[in-house]
Image: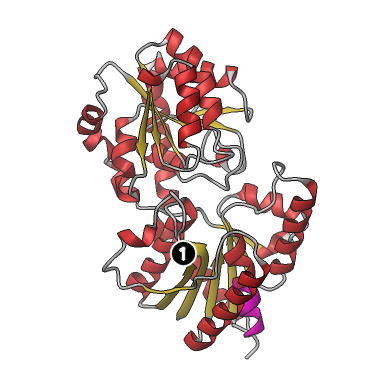
Amino acid sequence: MRIAHVITRMIIGGAQENTLLNCLDLKSLFGDDVLLVTGPAFGPEGDLLDRQQGSGLRVTMINSLRREIHPLRDWQALRAIKATLRAFHPEVVHTHSAKGGFLGRLAASSLRIPAIVHTVHGAPFHNFQGRGARLFFRQCEKYAAGKCHALISVADAMTDSLVAAQVAPRDKFTTIYSGMKVEPFLHANVHRDSMRQRFGFKTTDVVIGKVARLFHLKGHKYLIEAARKVVTQCPNTHFLLVGDGILREPLAAQIAAANLDAHFHFAGLVDPDEIPAFIGAMDILVHTSLREGLARTLPQALIAGKPVVSYDIDGAREVVVPHETGFLLQPQSQDGLSEALIQLSENGELRNQFGQTGCKRVAPQFCHQHMTKRIRSLYQQILADQPK
């Protein structure tokens, strides 16, 4: 097949890793002709493509394709995407992210591409927006949904949310979990001692990790507040924050104001291939985001045999089984977060029990090759259903 993927930007993030693995699998497993169309990866999150030199993946960079709304630049991006697709002549266009998904579907539809698919990594409208913005983005998503043949959700919760918002009927959605390289997480503990030494952790320390951009709605501030109580009761706990972003300085100031400097450690921007080693250094993974389709860090930690504590948002409950693989909490809760972290910090046997159960449940579902096979089968089904 000739397949074009369109995504707004290839920063280091879950949707981007998903897209890259899908593109590379289509080439290596099926011999497909694949083109990745994207915009520049501005920002402190890093550029995922910088770390993929030599992969052989064809990439077209469209400078006007940006995350921010800008009518003139967006019109230029639409024209550039259309020109790129017209020249490539794909059978399938697969779009990702809000801006890339909207413009990519419009371009592909206008060119009558035989199969147009969009992956919902996270809904572009949510309760933390103003009412006007929420209605606008919902209407944009509804309009774009009418321009494609199928929608892929990375979690059942995403389907439920978009169906409830009347973006598209349920039969247009297929849930396909976001795949990853499973093997490195199965062997994450190989790196445990060296990574803990790197940050000065003792063997008796309990390390609570969070893997997320230092960005709005990622919930770092709730973790810092909850940490006060955790450290008071369990002084051997340490918090490892993996990721970077625009909130680095405000979060550092909040940590200093709480007198928690000795217990918080910023790892900074980390190459995706190094994430297993960082998770290997952890004893518990915490996820306090307020919105996320299905955060990759949750299955990653469980595959590595680490228990998770997560706010009950979007697709989290599809991998976090309360009192079996971890704890699910009310979003923004701090007392409940403290209590869950204290319980796990004080009970190594419970940590191991949750982690082992999580690995058995999750590992088979998140293999990236399995994801790509299911996605490609969807492409084939759409093409087979086209009138001859």
Residue 288 higher or lower than 387, as above or below: above
Q: Check if residue 365 falls in the magenta segment.
A: no
Q: Is residue 107 magenta?
A: yes
Quarter of the C terminus within the rendering:
bottom right
Q: Is residue 111 visible?
A: yes
Q: Reply above or below: 75 against 157.
A: below
Q: How many marks?
A: 1
The image position of residue 15, as x and y in percent, is 49, 55
Query: What segment is highlighted magenta in the picture?
Result: 104-111
How many neighbours does mark 1 have within 10 angstroms: few (below 14), some (14-19), or many (20 or more)? some
Work out whether residue 383 can be spotted.
Answer: no
Residue drawn at x 43%, y 28% as measured from the top left: 354
* Along the line of sight, the residue nearer the viewer: 296 or 98: 98
Q: Horizontal and vertical percent for residue 232?
A: 45, 9
Residue drawn at x 78%, y 54% as measured from the top left: 135
Up/down of 186 relative to 373, above or below: above
Residue 381 in the figure: left or right of residue 139: left
Type of amino acid at the residue the image marks with label 1? Pro
* Residue at the (64%, 52%) spot, across then down: 123
Residue beneath label 1, please? 40
Answer with left or right where residue 144 lies relative to residue 334: right
Magenta span main SS: helix
